[in-house]
Image: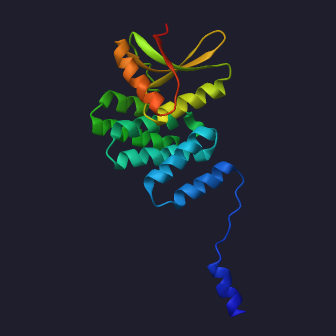
């Protein structure tokens, strides 16, 4: 009986997960190397964006940036949670931390907008932008948008009568846009420079 008890305490218990997102999230929280965990959290946020684990993953990514004192990136990531609205179980926590980041950055106006629950979404402006994709299905456009935002790019979406287009940045010169496009291509993305959409 004692041998059986000792054996059963040495064997790791396999937890049953209802979804792949739960399984990945559990795996990520067990990892002691932050950058490896962040990679899994990003995968969850992109592939399973409609799950509670996506919000929790974004929160952990944002806290990583906060700890690294990259308050701008932390605030941007917290805002991605806030955009989901009150359907997110961590909406209020994300709002608090976004507010805190903006206060540290000295951006009182943005901090107050977050505190009041106002959307702080802004579309970049410029003469040129980079079109990253055109989709018929909003889910695909959102997926591309989230991937770009998680990497820190100033992505935005514009709808036309037939397509949903995803763009990155607003640039005053074509050369500025070209530098960012080359950076995106090095990360495996495709895109092209175009005039800023009206």
Q: Residue at x 65, y 77 (%)?
A: 11
Q: Between 109 and 56, which is closer to the camera in this rendering? A: 56
Q: In the rendered image of this protein, does residue 63 appear above or below residue 75?
A: below
Q: Nearer the viewer, residue 113 or 54?
A: 54
Residue 88 percent across, percent down from the top left: 58, 40
Residue furthest bottom in the image: 2
The structure's colour scheme is rainbow
Q: Position of residue 68 (x, y in %)?
A: 34, 48
Q: Nearer the viewer, residue 131 or 113?
A: 131
Taking the image as shown, residue 104 lies to the left or right of residue 85, namely: left
Quarter that holds the N terminus: bottom right
Q: Is residue 171 above or below residue 1?
A: above
Rendered residue at 50%/53% (across/down): 37
Vertical position of residue 158 compared to residue 95: above or below: above
Residue 179 percent coordinates (x, y): 37, 23
Q: Quadrant of residue 134?
A: top right
Q: How many marks?
A: 0
Residue 5 location, quadrant: bottom right
Residue 22 visible, this angle = yes
Residue 117 appears anywhere in the view: no
Residue at figure coordinates x 45%, y 35% from the top left: 151
On screen, residue 61 above or below 197: below
Q: Position of residue 64 (x, y in %)?
A: 41, 48
């Amino acid at each position: 009986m004692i041998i059986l008890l000792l054996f059963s305490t040495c064997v790791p218990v396999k937890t049953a997960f209802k979804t792949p997102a739960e399984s990945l999230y559990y795996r990520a929280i067990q990892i002691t190397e932050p950058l490896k965990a962040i990679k899994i959290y990003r995968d969850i946020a992109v592939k399973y964006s409609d799950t509670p684990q996506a919000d929790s993953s974004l929160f952990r990514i944002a806290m990583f940036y906060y700890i690294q004192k990259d308050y701008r990136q932390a605030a941007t990531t917290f805002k991605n949670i806030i955009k989901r609205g009150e359907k997110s179980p961590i909406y209020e926590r994300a709002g608090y931390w976004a507010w805190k980041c903006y206060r540290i950055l000295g951006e009182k106006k943005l901090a107050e907008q977050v505190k009041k629950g106002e959307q702080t979404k802004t579309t970049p402006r410029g003469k040129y932008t980079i079109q990253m994709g055109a989709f018929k299905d909003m889910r695909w456009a959102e997926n591309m948008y989230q991937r770009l935002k998680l990497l820190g790019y100033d992505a935005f979406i514009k709808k036309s009568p037939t397509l949903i287009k995803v763009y990155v940045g607003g640039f005053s010169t074509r050369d500025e846009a070209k530098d960012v496009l080359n950076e995106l291509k090095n990360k495996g993305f495709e895109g092209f420079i175009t005039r800023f959409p009206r």
